[in-house]
């Protein structure tokens, strides 16, 4: 792991406070859009600044608690290309210039592979970033891609070079999920979309830094153990350990799917994983013995006994599992 890099950006996006915040995860992932759509053309820089500073809103809650914000803003890309948003973004940049740069990172149109073409997104992103930096030269402006759209054979990124070659970001983020399109037993080291994205977007372009802009796992008996395995990879794997930040996902999201919300055992594993990545900070106190998450932590998971990737495709209903190698692993589920 690059010294101090992962520790500089650890956080969580959630609909209600968890035990992960704030000491363990000072970064928050927040969003500004028109109900998931690009902002209306009539939106002014004053409107944007007002939404960022709205009292009681998640952005201000994070800042009041001493945290920092990775803020996604969804812009109308065609209008950005025509230059119509340049004055507004420059004014927004000037607003951010009055804040310490460590308090914000701006993400322009996260997961663009879902609803944009590279020929539009890349030049529009670069223009938006240039305008923001005209007002705040030290403001980090990032891209955040969609790992699903980088799975092998994906039509969305068939022309990978068109997405990656000329995209100028301060950092390159990627949203990675397990449990629907990608099996829970897969890890960060075997996720096919992440692997291809890293190869095309990061490793082929020396000097680019990357992070997990969204990182979630669907509810599953294996979830705490696989979180633990991923954090071991973040600390030790020759490629995965170059990751510079982790923003965990802990909300039902636009799908309103409660399966994405963390159970207490998974929260505990993530807390300990964050503490491990920070290295200089002692691990958080264990759960009380009467807590649903008691008895399950990173230390209690023998990662060497996890079955190989692809061994299971559905949630298990058993507590003890024999692997293909003859060993047995026990999972203690919250009651």
Image (spheres, rainbow, N blue to C red):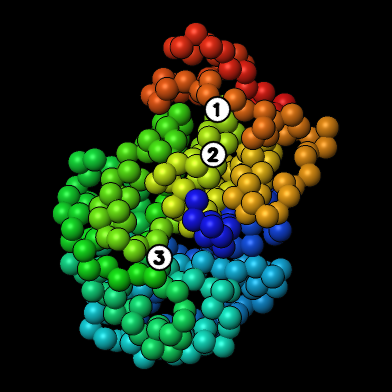
Question: Are the residues at dot 3 and dot 1 in contact (C-beta closer than 8 Å)?
Answer: no
Q: Is residue 38 above or below residue 182?
A: below
Question: Are the residues at dot 2 and dot 1 in contact (C-beta closer than 8 Å)?
Answer: yes
Residue 54 appears in view: yes
Q: Read off the residue under disc 1.
A: 303
> Real-space Cα distance between discs 3 and 1?
31 Å
Q: Read off the residue under disc 3.
A: 171
Quarter assignment of residue 185: top left
Q: Quadrant of the C terminus?
A: top right
Relative horizontal placement of residue 241, taking residue 274 as reference (left or right): left
Please tell me which residue lies in front, 307 or 280.
280
Please tell me which residue lies in front, 37 or 97.
97
Residue located farthest toward the top when viewing the structure as drawn:
326
Residue 311 x/y as whole percent: 41, 20
Give the crowd class for mark 3: few <14, some 14-19, many >=20 residues within 10 Å.
some
Q: What element carries label 1?
A: helix
């Amino acid at each position: 792991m690059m010294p101090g890099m992962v520790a500089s950006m650890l956080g969580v996006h959630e609909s209600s406070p968890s035990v992960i915040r704030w000491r363990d995860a000072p970064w928050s992932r927040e969003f500004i859009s028109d109900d998931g759509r690009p902002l209306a053309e009539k939106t002014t820089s004053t409107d944007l600044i007002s939404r960022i500073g709205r009292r009681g809103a998640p952005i201000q809650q994070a800042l009041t608690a001493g945290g920092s914000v990775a803020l996604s803003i969804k812009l109308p890309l065609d209008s950005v290309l025509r230059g119509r948003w340049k004055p507004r973004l420059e004014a927004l940049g000037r607003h951010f210039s009055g804040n310490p740069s460590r308090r914000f990172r701006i993400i322009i149109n996260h997961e663009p592979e879902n609803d944009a073409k590279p020929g539009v997104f890349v030049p529009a992103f670069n223009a938006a970033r240039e305008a923001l930096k005209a007002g705040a030269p030290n403001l980090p402006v990032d891209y955040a891609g969609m790992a699903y759209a980088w799975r092998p054979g994906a039509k969305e990124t068939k022309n990978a070079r068109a997405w990656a070659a000329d995209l100028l970001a301060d950092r390159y983020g990627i949203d990675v999920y397990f449990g629907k399109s990608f099996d829970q037993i897969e890890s960060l080291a075997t996720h096919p979309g992440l692997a291809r994205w890293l190869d095309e977007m990061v490793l082929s372009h020396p000097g680019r830094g990357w992070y997990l802009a969204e990182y979630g796992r669907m509810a599953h008996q294996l979830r705490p153990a696989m979180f633990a395995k991923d954090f071991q990879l973040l600390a030790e794997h020759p490629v995965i350990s170059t990751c510079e930040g982790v923003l965990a996902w802990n909300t039902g999201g636009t799908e309103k799917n409660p399966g994405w919300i963390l159970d207490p055992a998974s929260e505990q594993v993530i807390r300990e994983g964050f503490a491990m990545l920070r290295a200089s900070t002692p691990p958080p106190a264990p759960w009380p013995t009467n807590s649903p998450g008691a008895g399950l932590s990173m230390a209690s998971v023998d990662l060497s006994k996890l079955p190989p990737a692809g061994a299971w495709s559905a949630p298990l209903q058993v507590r003890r599992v024999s692997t293909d190698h003859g060993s047995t692993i026990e999972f203690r589920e919250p009651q």
